[in-house]
Amino acid sequence: MRAIDTNVLVRLITRDDSRQAASAESFIEKGAWVSVLTLAEAMWVLASVYNLNPKSLAQALEMLLNHRDLVLQDPETVAEALGLFREKPALGFSDCLMLQLARKAGHLPLGTFDRRLAKVEGTQKL
């Protein structure tokens, strides 16, 4: 299966360049894989460059989880991270994903200097 990078994923979500969006759609129509790194980077770009709010980011993540042509790496963990992000949007999706990946791998606690993240079960404030 093919894979896509952050730029392609962002184009599929924002559709702010019609030529690139069409090219991205054509590339993924036979299926494409999205790594958790690509997903985390895309959410950062959408928040910091496109100024999407947490609700819009959550909607984009939900769309990606249910997309007919995209296969997300570790979709169950991404869905768990999305749930945590919806509960605690101030954390940011990347921190939610990082914690859920560590949890799945059995590598808790997740050490952090982040005061907000440190309040979540499974973390330890350093």
Image (spheres, helix red, strand yellow):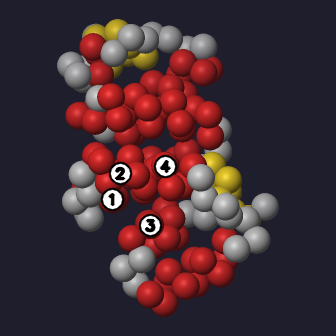
Asked whether the beta carbons under mark 2 and mark 3 sit within 8 Å of each other, the answer is: no
Question: Left or right of 6: which side holds 69?
Answer: right
Q: Nearer the viewer, mark 1 or mark 4?
A: 4
Residue corresponding to mark 3: 13
Residue corresponding to mark 1: 46
Mark nearer the N terminus (2 vs 3): 3
> Which quadrant would residue 73 be assigned to in this image?
top right
| Residue 77 x/y as whole percent | 57, 32
Residue corresponding to mark 2: 57
Residue corresponding to mark 4: 62
SS category of the residue bearing label 4: helix
Name which residue type carries label 1.
Leu
Mark nearer the N terminus (3 vs 1): 3
> Which quadrant would residue 124 be assigned to in this image?
top left
Mark 3 closeness class: few <14, some 14–19, many ≥20 residues within 10 Å: some
Measure the C-alpha gap from mark 1 to mark 4. Answer: 14 Å
| Residue 101 x/y as whole percent | 54, 28
Q: Nearer the viewer, mark 3 or mark 4?
A: 4
Mark 2 closeness class: few <14, some 14–19, many ≥20 residues within 10 Å: many
Q: Nearer the viewer, mark 3 or mark 1?
A: 3
Asked whether the beta carbons under mark 3 and mark 1 sit within 8 Å of each other, the answer is: yes
SS category of the residue bearing label 1: helix
Asked whether the beta carbons under mark 2 and mark 1 sit within 8 Å of each other, the answer is: yes
Numbered marks: total: 4
SS category of the residue bearing label 2: helix
